[in-house]
Image (spheres, coloured by chain):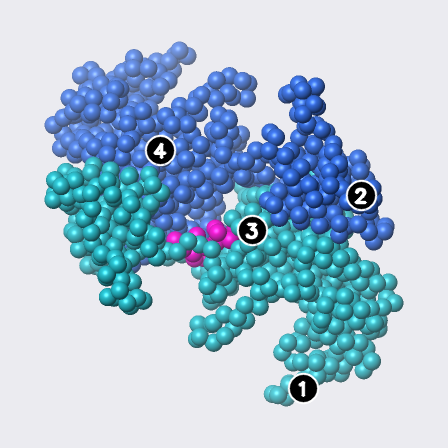
Chain colours: A blue, B cyan
Amino acid sequence: MSDLPALSGDTAAAKRAAMTSDPSRPEARSPRGFIDRRGRDVAAERAILTAVSGVYEQWGFEPLETGAFEYADALGKFLPDADRPNEGVFALQDDDEQWMALRYDLTAPLARFAAHNWETLPKPFRRYAYGPVWRNEKPGPGRFREFWQCDADTVGSARPEADAEIIAMAVEGLEAAGLPAGSAVIKINNRKLLNGLMSAAGVDSEAQKLAVLRAVDKLDRLGPDGVRLLLGEGRKDESGDFTKGAGLNAAAAERVLAFTAAGVGGRSDTLARLADVIGGSAEGDEGLAELAAIDAALSGLGVGPDRAVFDPSVVRGLEYYTGAVFEAELLLSTLDEKGQPMRFGSIGGGGRYDDLVARFTGERTPATGFSFGVSRLASALKAAGRDLAQAVRGPVVVIAFDQARMADYFAVARELRATGIAAEVYLGSSGMKAQMKYADRRLSPAAVIVGEDELAAGTVTIKDLDLGRALSAKVTDNAEWRGQRPGQQTVPRAELTAAVRAILDAD
Amino acid sequence: MSDLPALSGDTAAAKRAAMTSDPSRPEARSPRGFIDRRGRDVAAERAILTAVSGVYEQWGFEPLETGAFEYADALGKFLPDADRPNEGVFALQDDDEQWMALRYDLTAPLARFAAHNWETLPKPFRRYAYGPVWRNEKPGPGRFREFWQCDADTVGSARPEADAEIIAMAVEGLEAAGLPAGSAVIKINNRKLLNGLMSAAGVDSEAQKLAVLRAVDKLDRLGPDGVRLLLGEGRKDESGDFTKGAGLNAAAAERVLAFTAAGVGGRSDTLARLADVIGGSAEGDEGLAELAAIDAALSGLGVGPDRAVFDPSVVRGLEYYTGAVFEAELLLSTLDEKGQPMRFGSIGGGGRYDDLVARFTGERTPATGFSFGVSRLASALKAAGRDLAQAVRGPVVVIAFDQARMADYFAVARELRATGIAAEVYLGSSGMKAQMKYADRRLSPAAVIVGEDELAAGTVTIKDLDLGRALSAKVTDNAEWRGQRPGQQTVPRAELTAAVRAILDAD
């Protein structure tokens, strides 16, 4: 093995290969909307999932992993667009002609699982799950066709306390993942309140109800005055385009606006204000009673209004949920790509859906849950400088000079690993300088040199690469550091691990 | 909330639903070959992946996660059956008409990733990966269409030491996952040796070479005498069927048999014996030199012949690999479903494949790796009673009597969780007896009762469910245990967590 072949991947060769576009060779690329994640990004997401799993298990939720595929009829109703059952998902026909589709969320597989195993499950059944979901949609910047979700759900409890528990647990989970306390707030609404409001405001058709919801959803953008117009006859925008309104009379429109404005102050303040607006409608009263029970349970669980509020303006997913609705909003202000402060916004949500399991069994089964996007939370934590993954650091690299001495190099790496220090022997075919560059590129804290001199003297030479990087980044005062920390030192072999450990601990 | 709705999932209702087979309702079932995994099974696989990841990172391998889909042309050559490029995988056409397929292993995505990013990667590039892979094959008992693999590969090193490192690391990973030291052995062969043997035996066509390989592969079943016939003119089996042989002369057949029998004793013994059989062929000598270097590196890494041997009878995957080939065999004897001792056999394998990246770049790029089946290793560990997952134990269940006292129950659960004890409040709508049954079914160590008496007296009552289960399983002496451990105790509220902790620690 004295004549090792030259590394085929040197830059010149790679360029040559790229330029020789041989039509018989496939292009090395990922399908659109799918990405590769490496090193630190993977570690950051795993750290989130480990932390959140720990919390969810403490709360009595068990892990569940279902397969990537479900039969399309089992997903059917829950597809993003019910009119086009195979749109939005990746579907294919099995060899028995049945259509299967990759799951597009973790709730539909849970409903299928719960329906199938209902008799043998402990009830209520609490599970959490995480993993990739797939959406066959047009990819765009930050918009992927595969992404990870992490869900927790309780199936088989109609109690509002089950909602409160999910909310309190989600707060604890997000904080365990690294969010500073108070940097996320869960906004809670209830579909029954909204139905009560519709009765109180005299809304009498689904079309009118949708128009009201659509108007409310524009509150952030248009403010109360714009929404007032949209609730009434309609609104003409700056360009002169006219949007037809929901057609409410003035009193009804004011009632809707008062409803959306009720979410200020503490949770009981909001409830009192809501009672004024929709009190009297049976369904509204039911919604208020549920929120009052959620409030009491949240207080018992130590979740104050800094972490969970009632916000009647949250209308996201109200078509899907049957009772309480939650939305987790990050209050952390981060910088966008242009360095402008940016609010991160929603990172997850959930609510009560009492109809999903019924689809299979014909029996209404109360369920409630919360879901967040793992990559989205990871991005938020990264932007806020709070991710839990260990600082990026490569392994210690043992430099390889001489084929005949490989066993010595391996023994050094092995000794370092035995004390918990990640280490490897350089296994390419380049010389000393390229090996140092390799170690630097891997962000190795140190390189270990065991040359003939060292072997003869029973020593090792250790090069402090952390120091080198710090000096070149000018993050420290050269003279001061140089005084305390040698850039390179030769120590007796017996002091190898202690010397490397000192470099690792110095930062 | 005084009139909570009855739980819809009670047994009678579920049966009714199952009997009323409404054709408009989909059946709650998984697609064939896909399974759900719960609780302990999920925990066991996660424990394996955490342990193995820790080892692989210590050796300087970074995590990589690629998407589920690859373009079919990027998988093409590596499909299980090259003649039918879309067989064996789950493929579908994207809306731009390109065929995509779910990855069927983790090597093809690595090749695509390495080819795409070669210029910017540190070289050699070391990565590990785990996740599901999908095979569109006929499912059967223990044979799924989705399963998890865990791979580690070094791309860009032609050195035999890279093979040795992968082998030593795999051994350490498997032991970290729970395999007792010495219970798995990695068998190593080299395609070049086999090519050398073919030259030495005068094999002159691909067809004859295949016939020789096929004969050698039957060694376990037919023994040397049967294989000798298959290497020569052919063999008639008990039923009288005749299998045509490879057509070697007697001396050549003996040479092949001597080759396959060389794998006894230490690694250097095997090398010496192999040199006798195939010495002189240039390619055989090259293979011998590589194995000698692997032997030296393994010794430097402390991996003796109890953990890694040379075994020339390993012919699995020799068509695919270009140099060294590894197979990890479990020596653990476990019991099969009928209680018969059973050898677990292969749980993983790998080898050197220098052509995969070249498919994209046109440049030969040396690579070597090892892969194991996560569920398969989990099954082996479970069968051997060695899995790392924590003992199955549910959360402590706080019994719920009175809607007005829910906040008190939540406060108890919260206090337990704050000291690291998993706990939940019962959130169904059943009475005391059903709640106890629920707690028992969840394998809760204890149930906590906070009734009116306890609230008035400032106490809690704790029921020891671990004890109840131990007594009913008769694993202990009733009188003795009863003396030491009360089945139920009422303690001051301030002693809640200490009393529950005592139950948890008693087992």
Q: Which chain letter matches label 4?
A: A
The image quarter in which residue B296 lies: bottom right
Callout 3: few (<14), some (14-19), or many (20+) C-alpha neighbours within 10 Å? many
How far apart are labels 3 and 1 at the CA level?
A: 47 Å
Instruction: Determine if marks 1 and 4 fall on one subunit.
Output: no
Lateral position of residue B88 relative to residue B432, left or right = right
- In the image, which is nearer the foreground, mark 3 or mark 2? 2
Rendering coords of residue A412 (x, y %): 70, 46
Which residue is disc 4 drawn over? A171
Q: In the rendered image, which quarter contains the C terminus of chain A?
A: top right
Q: Residue at x 67, y 53 (%)?
A: B166
> Is mark 4 in CB contact (under 8 Å) with mark 2?
no
Relative vertical location of residue B185 with respect to residue A67 in this rendering, above or below = below
How far apart are labels 3 and 2 at the CA level?
A: 37 Å
**Secondary-structure class at tag 4:** helix
**Secondary-structure class at tag 3:** helix
Lateral position of residue B482 relative to residue B118, left or right = left
How far apart are labels 4 and 2 at the CA level?
A: 59 Å
Which residue is disc 3 drawn over? B52
Q: Which chain letter matches label 2?
A: A
- Between discs 4 and 2, the one toward the N terminus: 4
Q: Which label belongs to residue A457? A: 2
Per the rendered image, the range of residues in magenta is: B34-49
Q: Residue at x 43, y 39 (%)?
A: A51
Rendering coords of residue B451 (x, y %): 14, 45
Q: Amino acid at mark 1?
A: Lys
- In the image, which is nearer the foreground, mark 3 or mark 4? 3
Callout 2: few (<14), some (14-19), or many (20+) C-alpha neighbours within 10 Å? few
Lateral position of residue A326 relative to residue A417, left or right = left
Q: Amino acid at mark 3?
A: Val
Instruction: Determine if marks 3 and 2 fall on one subunit.
Output: no
